[in-house]
Image: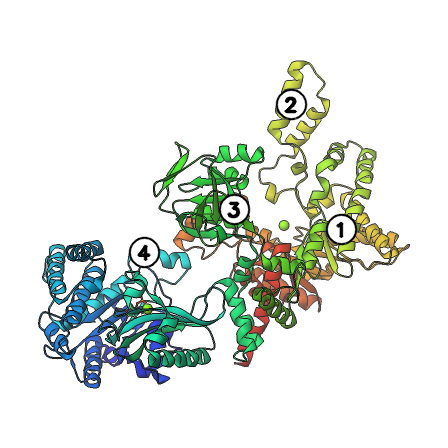
Amino acid sequence: MAAAETAKHTYVYDFAEGNKDLKDLLGGKGANLAEMTNLGLPVPPGFTITTEACQAYLATGEQPAGLAEQIDTHLAALEATRGKRLGDPADPLLVSVRSGAKFSMPGMMETVLNVGLNDESVAGLSAQAGGNDRFAWDSYRRLIQMFGKTVCEVPGEEFEHALDEAKRAKGTGNDLDLDADDLRALVGTYKKIFSKHTGREFPQDPREQLDLAIRAVFDSWNADRAVLYRRQERIPADLGTAVNVVAMVFGNLGSDSGTGVAFTRDPATGAQGIYGDYLANAQGEDVVAGIRNTVPLQELERIDKRSYDELLRIMATLEGHYRDLCDIEFTIERGKLWMLQTRVGKRTAAAAFIIAAQLVDEGIIDLDEALHRVTGAQLAQLMFPRFDLGGAPEVLAKGVGASPGAAVGKAVFDSQRAVELAKQGEPVILVRRETNPDDLPGMIAAQGILTSRGGKTSHAAVVARGMGKTCVCGADSLEVDVRGGQFTVGGHTVREGDMISVDGTTGCVYRDKVQVQPSAVVRYFEGDVTPETTEDPLVAAVHRIMSHADAARRLRVRTNADTGPDAARARRFGAEGIGLCRTEHMFLGDRRELVERLILARTDEERQAALAALLPLQRADFVEIFREMDGLPVTVRLIDPPLHEFLPPLEELAVNVAVAQARGEDAAKDEALLAAVRRMHEQNPMLGLRGVRLGLVIPGLFAMQVRAIAEAAAERARDGGDPRPEIMVPLVGAVQELETVRAEAEKIIAEVRREQSVEILIGTMIEVPRAALTAGQIAEAAQFFSFGTNDLTQMGWGFSRDDVEGAFFWRYLELGIFGISPFESIDREGVGRLVRIAVDEGRAARPGLKVGVCGEHGGDPESVHFFHEVGLDYVSCSPFRVPVARLEAGRAAVESAGSDSR
Ligand code: ADP
Ligand code: MG
Ligand code: MG
């Protein structure tokens, strides 16, 4: 019964039965071949074996019941259409067997052409081609080569070597100079190579060739390189690949035949036109293999005008149909054009914006669709400075672009040395085989990081992304000799101190210093260029799409900034206020002295005196920030970190005291500080005396800050400004904490307000799990919530970011416990659930409660979509991420509107 049911399952689809939306089942290649077939374009007939068949095969090691029969049926139909039988000695049907997963994937088996040829049918093929022996033997040697290499794992070099040998014997470098006899001899050599490596003869049975090729495609899903690639790109491991069996068409039939690739627009710049390459008298893979020189596609107009015109018509049809840039593979067989592949083409970040804007201009898509087609990640890429490649700098190696940016510095091979040189003001690039937690200081000191091992989830990659530092990893052509302080690559040696340049976007490593160019997109956001003052189509496209994102989005975007200049910059980047103004830095620098006095105060008077000295300094800071953000909300967080962070480190003090005592000098102040540091030592500072707890324990501390805020606001208002301060209390876990702080704060605000009336909101961060779970109570006392998702993640998971990111995240990513670091992108199910609960219960208790997020997640594309979904009012992120957040907030709004109406 079960067997009968599986037998009915459809595992094979004719091209005429599929369409482009069936990529899950038919893979990208199969779905698009079907789509082109149904558009009436000239696609050679064929069929697709589904990803489900592959999944079933991989699960059991055997082809699922019914598959063999379905292949028989479809093959018979294909034979009938072509009027030929597979491998028929007199007139053979030949097919290609092509892998095609939902996502294209390097490392998987690619394609075998000319399946169906053997010692007999090679003669039939020649006869059918009008006695073209050369063509027939050329096709046969290709089959043995591709079949041997991809199906039977015969080392490809051996075939290439034999081919080179044949050309050398003939005194030529060109495949085309080999005649039929040469190729027949080469087939003999190839067969020997085949049997030497496989222990069997090259299979002569056409159907066996076909079945082995299909099976090899299935198996290649689990090839090492494919597995590695999927892990890095976070492609699920269980999708499987489809297999396409396509009737062969021949580009190697003579000078009136050929093969080519084309783009409907320039994938690098988005410019419209004909972009592609053509190679006469060749089979598919020759174009990309670079064996012979291709000609620009425009030349085809001269070579075969009819086919060229038809190709242009088809390209227009495809663009109109897919409403996007397409890339295409085609073959011309004796003046007849055949389409072999199309897909929506990959493109650079700049081209993505330009093409989307162009398609809007051409009326092909609307602005919502344009917005949907670009991403925050692409925009972020465009905001990094880039290398000026005009001087064609020498590429030393290429690795994985793990964390974007353009970094230049002296190569350094150990962490300590990196720190030393950086202290002397030297830019350095830390080069390692791989990094581990011991390298952290060097990674912090370096401009960029380069490793020869590991991929996007290696320690180096994870930590560099966390720090926003440029990183290239897995540049495996580098021989890194850490002890010897050098690396070698392709005969070059780079020693410690030699300049190198690394591009974390492309993964390229250059010799020497490469000039860095500022980003045109940043200059646009800065207001240095406008679409009116530049010809750059990228600026116009970004302007257009950003304007639409701003109009579409519901989320406001604020910034995290604690200084006037940062605030001003963020405002130029489109920030609509400050979501997090930290006050910690206002206690650093020459103010440390005052903070030390505050901490060491033994009496109320001493403490009050220290606070009174800090007050005007804080007030001046706030005045400047309120001025830059005039008319926009500014959320000021009261002091958050444990106070001992403002004191010198224990070891340093201990040494100072010991030295002073040995010399008989007076060390009273250092002794007092040392005692304070010892007294304030905490086992777990992250979970210690910080945030609201400080405010409740140290009399007058929060009061001073509140007064500084209120007085600064009053001063701005007096000067005609429009300050909109919001006071935010950190680390609240219980409503009582907030109530206590709020009562004191309101008293102070009321005092100041007697002179000048400025409305000041008082709210809280939600960053302790208990706060999220009691948000209904807390909302009674809070005029707004702001999620501190960094702490909420730390406390939700029970680990501290500084300790864990370098210690074990790479392992968790490798094991798939994390798809992505929960500090990079919000953990929707866990931490996100806390956010949902707090939003719902907070708003239920206080309708209209203003809710935002001020953790770094506010600038992460995925997380922005989540915050849109849960209905936050705003996200807040670093100034540089503001445009990314604006774009993604727009995309989230457009996409959710789209899915509502669907
Ligand atoms: P890839 O995914 O590596 O591009 P393809 O399956 O597209 O692999 O095939 C490799 C090359 O062989 C391409 O140039 C393609 O156009 C060509 N090719 C595939 N099938 C056929 C066919 N039936 N007739 C002629 N050429 C083909
Ligand atoms: Mg292809
Ligand atoms: Mg916090």
Q: Quadrant of residue 288?
A: bottom left
Determine the secondary structure under disc 1.
helix
Q: Earlier in the sequence, mark 2 or mark 4?
A: 4
Residue for badge 3: 407
Mark 2, mark 4: which one is toward the viewer? 4
Q: Earlier in the sequence, mark 1 or mark 2?
A: 2
Determine the secondary structure under disc 2.
helix
Tell me if the residue at label 4 has its CB under 8 Å from ligand 1: no
Q: Amino acid at mark 3?
A: Ala
**Residue sitting at 13 percent across and 61 percent down?**
186
Mark 3, mark 2: which one is toward the viewer? 3
Q: Of residues 525 and 685, which is closer to you in this image?
A: 525
Question: x, y (%) of residue 196?
Answer: 11, 55
Q: Amino acid at mark 2?
A: Asn
Q: Is residue 708 above or below residue 411?
A: below
Q: Which mark is residue 225?
A: 4
Q: Amino acid at mark 4?
A: Arg
- Determine whether, in the image, residue 556 is placed left or right of residue 252: right
Task: Report how far apart the C-alphas of labels 4 and 3 lie in the structure.
Answer: 29 Å
Question: x, y (%) of residue 658?
Answer: 63, 19
Q: Are marks 3 and 2 in contact (CB under 8 Å)?
A: no
Asked if residue 2 shows in the view, the reply is: yes
Q: Which mark is residue 656?
A: 2
Q: Amino acid at mark 1?
A: Val
Question: x, y (%) of residue 226?
Answer: 32, 59
Mark 1, mark 3: which one is toward the viewer? 3
Q: Are marks 1 and 4 in contact (CB under 8 Å)?
A: no
Task: Report how far apart the C-alphas of labels 1 and 2 lie in the structure.
Answer: 38 Å
Residue for badge 1: 741
